[in-house]
Amino acid sequence: MLGLAGVTVATAVASCSSSSNKAAGSDSGAPLDATQDTSLATDGPAPEAAADSANDAPATVTGMEIVTASGAPLQAAAGDAIPLKVVLTLSDGTTEPLPMGTQVTWTQPGTVVAQDPNDAGPNGILPAPGAQPTGIFVQNPFRPERTDYTGTLFVIDPGTGSTGMLTVTASVADAGSVSATFTISPTPAGDPDAGANLFHNVLNCAGCHGETAAGSPPEDGGPDGSPVYLLQGNPYPYPAPGLNNTSPGGSPNLAADPAWNAALLGMAAQADMDNQGVSLRKPMPDWLGKKGVDGGVLSAQDFAHIYAWLKTQTQ
């Protein structure tokens, strides 16, 4: 038995049986004559009725499983962000949501807590890539308006193999833990033309980062003489950084920095956290779950397109 906030997870499925029937008013095997009552007396429901009764019996809870919130298969590419949830499994093969208010804690892979952008440590805090795929969950206390981090798996590296496996585990209050395994593939190849369309037309990244992704230039200084940057029409004391394939002043922009790649660009855009684990400040939008060119949510493929276009921009 598995108790879950008032719901019992039963591992046994109820069985049904019915007793045999014989003719009323006659000995076993004796023929009925015209004067005998030809109705059948039963000790229980007829077989058809018993079957119907079994089919009408309510399904019982048999366990739990981790599924994608969209209902898609458990597979992803490096650069994807996949919202997950835990559901109850039922004896009839269907599933249903956990009882409202059930606490779920995502325990594997680990959770990265974004660093303060005004006081970040000198070293990055993302896990190092390895032979197997790398994924993380994210908490970002510096973007309190974000409510979509919980249960979202960010795949940041595919591992060294052509296809790898990534295990995800959740702990459910009063019910134990449950795991699932994702198939992870490498980041797909990107097309610069598709990336240009996403950057300029679909997502309007150019509105802050510039037409060639060189970053936002400073405007006239503020009252203390410090530079001011206009982002989405509002003044900020910091710029939208350069993303293209140049190194102004010797400091590489994103596409020129070997510490970045398309998968990390996907994570940064969807988790508002850079490749060192530092929170990205407003007005960086929340791109998690937003629509791409084909009407589907933004995926590793979309960010691969954008990254491919950024690599072509050297102005």
Image (tube, grey):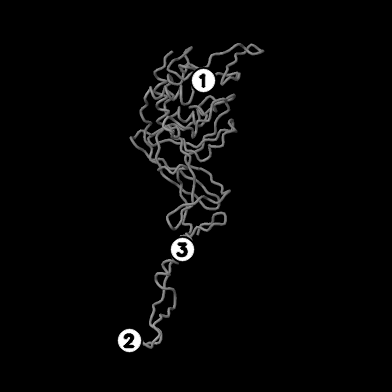
* Three-letter code for the amino acid on which mark 3 is drawn: Asp
Q: Report how far apart the C-alphas of labels 2 and 3 lie in the structure.
A: 37 Å
Farthest residue to the front: give it: 34
Q: Residues within 10 Å of mark 1 (few under 14, many from 20)?
A: some
Residue at the image point whose x is 45% and y is 14% from the top: 247
Secondary structure beneath label 1: helix
Q: Which residue is mark 2?
A: 31
Q: Residue 211: image x %, image y %?
A: 47, 17
Q: Residues within 10 Å of mark 3 (few under 14, many from 20)?
A: few
Q: In which image quadrant can residue 119 be found?
A: top right
Q: Residue 35: image x %, image y %?
A: 38, 88
First-in-chain label (2 vs 3): 2
* Three-letter code for the amino acid on which mark 2 is drawn: Pro
Farthest residue to the right: give it: 223
Q: Nearer the viewer, residue 121 or 35?
A: 35
Secondary structure beneath label 2: loop
Labels 2 and 3 touching (C-beta < 8 A): no
Q: Residue 255: image x %, image y %?
A: 43, 20
Residue at the image point whose x is 51% and y is 50% from the top: 97
* Three-letter code for the amino acid on which mark 1 is drawn: Gly
Q: Residue 292: image x %, image y %?
A: 44, 30
Secondary structure beneath label 3: helix
Q: Quadrant of the C terminus?
A: top left
Q: Which residue is mark 3?
A: 56
First-in-chain label (2 vs 1): 2
Judge from the rendering whether residue 225 lies leftward or rightward of residue 126; answer left or right: right
Judge from the rendering whether residue 231 lies leftward or rightward of residue 92; answer left or right: right
Label placed on residue 67: none
Label placed on residue 207: 1
Of badges 2 and 3, nearer the viewer stands 2
Of badges 2 and 1, nearer the viewer stands 2
